[in-house]
Image (cartoon, coloured by chain):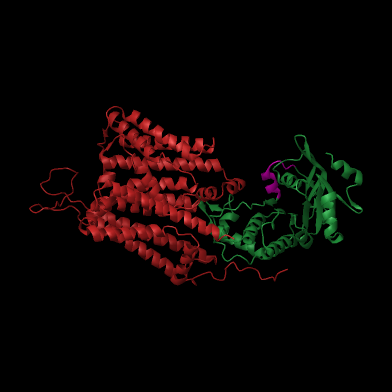
Chain colours: A green, B red
Amino acid sequence: MNDSTPLLELRDVNKSFGPVHVLRNVDLSVYAGQVTALVGDNGAGKSTLIKGIAGIHSFDSGEYLFEGKPVSVTEPKQANNLGIEVVYQDLALCDNLDVVHNMFLGREESKGIVLDEITMERRATETLASLSVRTLKSIRQQVSSLSGGQRQTVAIARAVLWNSKLVILDEPTAALGVAQTEQVLNLVRRLADSGLGVILISHNMNDVLQVADNIACLYLGQLAAQISAKEVGHGQIVELITMGRSGDIGLNPETVAAGGHV
Amino acid sequence: MSTQQTTDVDVSAAGDSAGVGRALGDYFRRIKGGDVGSLPAVLGLIVLVVIFSVLQGNTFFTALNFANLLNQGTAIIVLAMGLVFVLLLGEIDLSAGFAAGTCAAVLAVSLTNWGWAWPLALVAALVTGLIIGLLIGLLVARLGIPSFVVTLAAFLGLQGVMLLIIGDGGTIPIQNDVLLAIMNRNMPVWAGWVLWFVVSAGYALVSLRAITNRRKVGLPSTSTSVWAAKSASIAILLGVAVYLLNIQRQIVRPGKVPCTKIGPPNEPLGCIPTIQGVPWAVLVVLVLLVVLTFVLGRTAFGRHIYAVGGNAEAARRAGISVSGIKIACFMICSFLAAIAGVLLASRDNSVSPTTGGAQTLLYAVGAAVIGGTSLFGGRGRVIDAIIGGLVVAVIANGLPLITQQSGIQYVVTGLVLLVAASVDALSRKRSSGSLR
């Protein structure tokens, strides 16, 4: 695999739920070492696209290429085996367990039937260190005692723990204050810098422009554009999100007009 | 971007830097944060013992009564141990008391009426418990009926099943020596001390090994002084208990001498039979404590129980079979109820339609909650059942010595349960309040 091959590539994917055509001929490329922001208004199809990538729904048609090879992902497990991890908005952490237990939940290391706490704690410590996480006092503290940003950190670290190649983050900063948002965005940047592909879903244009390398904009189930973050400004992204078109980029006017009727 | 300082997950603090002082500090911080654990129950136990000793010292604080108290508490403790598993999921089992009664009835009928060998009858009783738990678990986990309703139905249904099994006779006696010995006989004095040594040394060695293993790989661990203090206090506490139980507790009337030879109960020996030693039932409770604590704390299965109780959706997404865990916990609960039923039958020398009825279940739920197991799920330990069970037993044992009015006894027990539930609710509020 050379640098120009995307880590994940979707070509012409479609997805319908009954009569509702949610995704129409969507193309998406995600490169290793880059943060790809996925933006779009509510109902644009972001969640459906993510769930398709994660194997929760399978796409009706289209190609799904991972590391340049076509793969079939119809179950979450298949996505996990490829190295795709999703951090959902609700984080799915158990408040009553500590950081290590949460990171290994459902995939505990054990010797015979006895849990191997030492190995788990070491691996958790290493992973957090590799992400330069400096905000946790102890990895043996219960998650209930953590702040929102720390919880997000734990959820992201859990996704990274499994030698993942692609991490999908669903609105990681939605519930956070300014300082914690900064911490999480730094973490997102470090994930990409360490060679992982990252898909970031966000409604916050400032976050997107700060951390993303390129931006994929969905408009009514179609990909309006996937562009380098350097080439666009705040206003252009908002236009792409709200109208599917901004100047020369985006969907052509007829499609936009048709899109409104579907 | 922030500086490239790697981590402050405290790796440098590995080894023996934290002394008793820091450990105590951490403990108080946890309590402040709402994680009170068994502390209220332990304090309550001490207060109750002091009150009863002051008010009724010559009847309450005696070796005989101490043994009585353990005897009264054992079945409730075992029942509460089972309930801990169900409460950890945030569920409830109201039928555990009559599950105990039903299993005891199966034991009595197969033993006395059908003349089965005692091991066979015992297995039949325990299997009955597993089947009851399986049915409840299937209804709760697969059909999604709230456990409150399922077990309320089982509470009524099992009462009926019990009546049908026992039949018209009303009470079935148990005459098997082995089964009766569990609650009525004591270990020899030397065996009590051997047990003390094995438990104290076992605890010390296992915890020391955990500490040295962590040190070897440079992970932070409890300091040696904390370990020594803990191990010593456990050894002292158990030593006092064994010493008290090894005192001759038969009251020797003037003109009689205690026996030098121990005979079977009720054997005419011309002397007053010696009663001393640790009751065999204590061994049963200890074995259950060790096995169940291991399951909850050291296996993936136990970890998954906590996960399901803490956040079932997160557990499901992590690939844990939530319904499997639920069914298993209801089976464990009813299985332990079956053991409690055997203990009740052994204590009463018989099984009647009231075995496991009346306040048995509520005392057991009370014991688990008083001990520090949360009614909201996700928090609790097996030892909670023992600590809470002792509180309940002390109240049930001490109050009648002070007042004969059973009205007062019920009111006090109810209040204690309410206080425990309030502590649980408040500590939960507190820990979720410190969240953000």
Outermost residue toward the top? B168
Whether residue B335 is visible: yes
Q: Which residues are magenta?
A: A72-82
Q: On the picture, is A48 further left or further right than B390? A: right
Is residue B199 or residue B331 the one in the foreground?
B331
Is residue B253 or residue B260 the one in the foreground?
B253
Q: Position of residue B86 (x, y in %)?
A: 46, 45
Q: Please identify the dominant SS of the magenta region.
A: helix
Quarter of the rendering occupied by the N terminus of chain B: bottom right
Q: Position of residue B297 (x, y in %)?
A: 48, 53
Residue at x 34%, y 54% (from the top left corner): B391
Whether residue B277 is visible: no
Quarter of the rendering occupied by the C terminus of chain B: bottom right
Residue at x 46%, y 54% (from the top left corner): B424
| Residue A78 is covered by the magenta coloring | yes
Relative vertical location of residue A250 with respect to residue A181 in this rendering, above or below: above
Is residue A103 or residue A252 the one in the foreground?
A252
Q: Position of residue B150 (x, y in %)?
A: 47, 36
Q: On the picture, is B19 further left or further right than A247? A: left
Q: On the picture, is B184 further left or further right than A248? A: left
Outermost residue toward the left? B255
| Residue A110 is covered by the magenta coloring | no
Q: Position of residue B299 (x, y in %)?
A: 50, 51
Residue at x 53%, y 69% (from the top left corner): B14
